[in-house]
Amino acid sequence: MKTTRFKFAVIMVSGTLLLMVAPATLASASPGGFGFGHHHGGGDGRPGSNRGAAVVSVTSSPYGQVLVVGGSGAGYDPSSPNADPQGYLYPPGSSLYAASIDSPAFGQGLFGLPYVAGCNATTSAVSVVEGGPETCAGTETDPSVDWPALTTLGAPIAGPGVNRFLLGAVFRADLDAYQVTYAGHPLYLFDQGPNSFVGEDFFETVGPLLFPWETAWYLVSPNGQINPGPANLSVVTPQSGTEYTSDVLATEMLPNAVPNGVPVAVYTFSADTPWHSNCYGACAREFIPLTTQGAPTEQAGVNAGDVGVITRWDGSQQVTYHGHPLYIYNQEQPFPLSPTAFQSVGNGNGVSAFGGTLSLVTP
């Protein structure tokens, strides 16, 4: 199992852009029921076997209160020579993330059908930057997985600060396991240890440079909202190879993975009306709403008076510019400027789907 720290050392040395480098849903599970134990049984050491159910806790972070692994940890490796808790690949305090490509788990898995995640364990890919082959999801002990799912064999347990009524699980056939959910968000792991938030605002879009998961990754707040931190708007200038010929508006992604982050082009959606988004469901999984936790920040060239927020139906705060809701494109292509500086191509400009068209934004 490669560590996150090593992974990013390889990425930066390469000088290549990291950007865009179930049975019934258990909305409120209780111990001892709901058919847990029918998968991964027999004391294999995974969370929820003879070591109890997966535990979700809360910790303080630079982004406020966020969900983390609790209990003894996640992904116990019975072959590890280390004693507990070192035997857990993801010890207590490891951050938990949600993927924008996943559909909400509420109401999924009806009529005995498993939940089908956008981040799946069946599609394998190779990345110039990140190596591989790897799948997007898998179990915690699988070394060929980019974002291991937080799985459980018992009804997941709410630690201090966690709303037990938002905690649940769905069965995933591709994992042959139950994945823990929170407010309908399937939960994943990335950082192997506490006080690490490298996965925050991570953006993996298209190959061959990156794994083509077509998703952004966010921390999760105890209230059930994704937590992207404050959106940070900037202006990027055109380069030979970008789709734009004048300055465009961008937002910072990968703030903890690439020095100074990566400016990613933002878009408006023609099906929207001023101060109102009409992009939900499948639309929002391809045209990802630019959300913010707290007031957005603005870099040079961005007029703060033109920046605002609206409240989406799920309670999240979407950033607007001149009243137009903003989005990032889940198939954005990377554009390396140098071994340590990157931006995006802007290839979402003119993409039409879901009754509207994306357009780059002139500051």
Image (cartoon, rainbow, N blue to C red):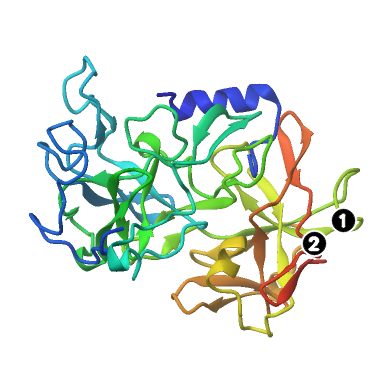
Query: Relative to 220, is 26 on the left or the right?
Result: left
**Residue 265 bears which disc, if any?**
none
Residue 245 image offset from top left, x and y in percent: 92, 55
- Residue receiving disc 1: 244
Which is nearer the eye, 65 or 56? 56
Q: In which quarter of the view is residue 323 placed? A: bottom right
Query: Relative to 57, is 196 on the left or the right?
Result: right
Mark positioned earlier in the residue sequence (1 or 2): 1
- Residue receiving disc 2: 349
Say which amino acid is labelled 1: Tyr
| Circle 2: element type | loop
Residue 153 image offset from top left, x and y in percent: 18, 46
Q: In which quarter of the view is residue 25 placed? A: bottom left
Asked if the residues shown at circle 1 and circle 2 are in contact, with their CB atoms under 8 angstroms apart, the answer is yes
Say which amino acid is labelled 2: Asn
The answer to whether one can see residue 274 in this image is yes
Query: Relative to 274, is 281 on the left or the right?
Result: left
Indicate whether 190 appears above or below 353: above
At 35% from the left and 64% from the top, the residue drawn is: 184
Indicate whether 83 appears above or below 204: above
| Circle 1: element type | loop
The answer to whether one can see residue 158 in this image is no
User: Label 1 crowding class (10 Å Cα cut-off): few <14, some 14-19, many 20+?
Assistant: some
Query: Relative to 322, is 275 on the left or the right?
Result: left
* 1 vs 2, front mark: 2
Quarter of the image for the C terminus: give it: bottom right
Q: How many marks?
A: 2
